[in-house]
Amino acid sequence: MMRLLLKSAIGIVLLMALCAALCAQESKGTHRKVRVRDESATALSEAEAAMEKQDFASAEQKLTAITVATPQDYRAWFDLGYVYSATHRKDRAIEAYRKSIAAQPGVLEPNLNLAMLLAEKGEPEAGRYLRAAQKLKPSAEVQKRIAAAWVVLGDALESKDRAGAIDAYQQAAELNPNDPSMHVALGHLYEEGKDDKAAEPEYKAALALDANSRDALALLSNLYLRTNRAAEAEGTLREFVAKQPQSVNGHLQLGRLLATQDQHEDAIVEFEKALQLAPTDVEVEKALAASQLKLKQYDKAVATLKVLTANSPKDAALHYLLADALLHALQYEAAQNEFIVTAKLKPGWAEPYGGMAIAASENKNYELAIRALDARAKLAPETPPTYFLRATCYDNLGAKELASAAYKEFLKVSDGKFPNQEWQARHRLIAIDPATRKKAK
């Protein structure tokens, strides 16, 4: 799911400012048709003074009494909603704000605070109150809060109401037209709805606002690739890096695109340009290592992956890649050690044990190779290569009966797909297995 940073911008509107605004509105006679008794006004002032001191228990007691005596006092209900919200009773805050709005619909602050709370809960009804707040001519600062509330609502609706989420992000984009993340979110939702024609201009709009938007660039390129428009994707990225040669992300995305087309040499050129700009960028280093491995540049891949594993020592996948690169680079002892590290980091993963067995066998550490094969067999089915490797390890240890059994298992399942190994297995059986030797005669 797309997660957006604007979520953190939401907060309950400052109490001091709201109280001042509400008092000003009352002085004009626009929010009360019935004059509050002096004692109620005094109690309300005392409650708000307690709120300023964060004495919410005292404020709640006074405000509850006012709402009982004067149930149409929208300001008391508003203050009570604030108290409930500040003391983490959001459902009661929602109820109080609803009553404030019912008593006086045309006030900005209750509509906005209620909308914020409903948006946080992912309630589509939040949109109704956000629209009501927008109609009340909020200040520029409050408009930012409304935009942030639309973002939170959109984020909450993405998984259950795509159309509602799209509407929420569109509202946020109108209120905050310079924010590229809104267009990225919209494009992502359109793509999820299989509407590529609507998604493409959103990504382009995001790039127009922020030419370095990693998400927009990656998503637009992926859209082109998914719709068999690789030439457009490459053209877009090459044009981008020509205009923005200092963009790490531009070189990374172009390199990734070239790699998907097996143009790994050209991809490496782009990755290296990116690393010149950002020498410690992990994503670039991973992409570079992948292309180096594809080109069988094992020594170079080892160097790249050593940097990555040093920076991410608990990443089992990176250690596995390094171990595999070392194995192909014929650095068997180092490979064996890396496979051991990988297995310790992720003991339920079968692949490291297979690699460990191969490396240990090449190191003539046949006991370790067999232990690794036994560990692998507990996690995944045996295969012709594992049977053959097991057989050769036993054979080298002089365990003729165990070697014979493994060679026979290998021949049962090899099905002519491993002719060299099958020839070797048959000849070793003649040499070490009396029954086979007798049949051969």
Image (cartoon, grey):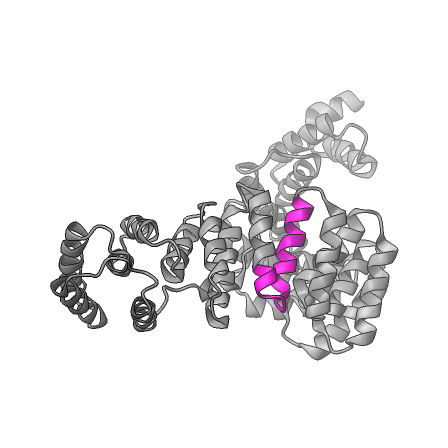
On whether residue 195 falls in the magenta region, the answer is no
Give the camera-side residue of 362 and 208.
208
Compared to residue 237, the image places residue 356 above or below, namely: above
Q: How many labels were placed on the picture?
A: 0
Give the camera-side residue of 1 and 45.
45
410 displayed left or right of 419: left
In the image, farthest residue toward the left = 39
Compared to residue 171, the image places residue 122 above or below, namely: above
Q: Residue at x 19, y 63 (%)?
A: 56
Q: Residue at x 56, y 48 (%)?
A: 165
Q: Position of residue 257 (x, y in %)?
A: 79, 58
Q: Position of residue 84 (x, y in %)?
A: 25, 56
Compared to residue 234, the image places residue 243 above or below, namely: below
385 displayed left or right of 35: right
In the image, farthest residue toward the right = 231
Q: Look at the image and give the residue range highlighted in magenta.
A: 172-192
Residue 86 shows in this picture = yes
Residue 331 shows in this picture = no
Q: Residue at x 32, y 50 (%)?
A: 94
Q: Give the main secondary structure of the magenta stretch.
A: helix
Q: Residue at x 51, y 64 (%)?
A: 6
Quarter assignment of residue 392: top right
Quarter assignment of residue 268: bottom right
Give the camera-side residue of 24 and 290.
24
Q: Position of residue 141 (x, y in %)?
A: 47, 71
Give the camera-side residue of 39 and 55.
39
Which image quadrant: the C terminus? top right
Compared to residue 68, the image places residue 49 above or below, namely: below
On whether residue 180 falls in the magenta region, the answer is yes
Q: Position of residue 163 (x, y in %)?
A: 59, 43
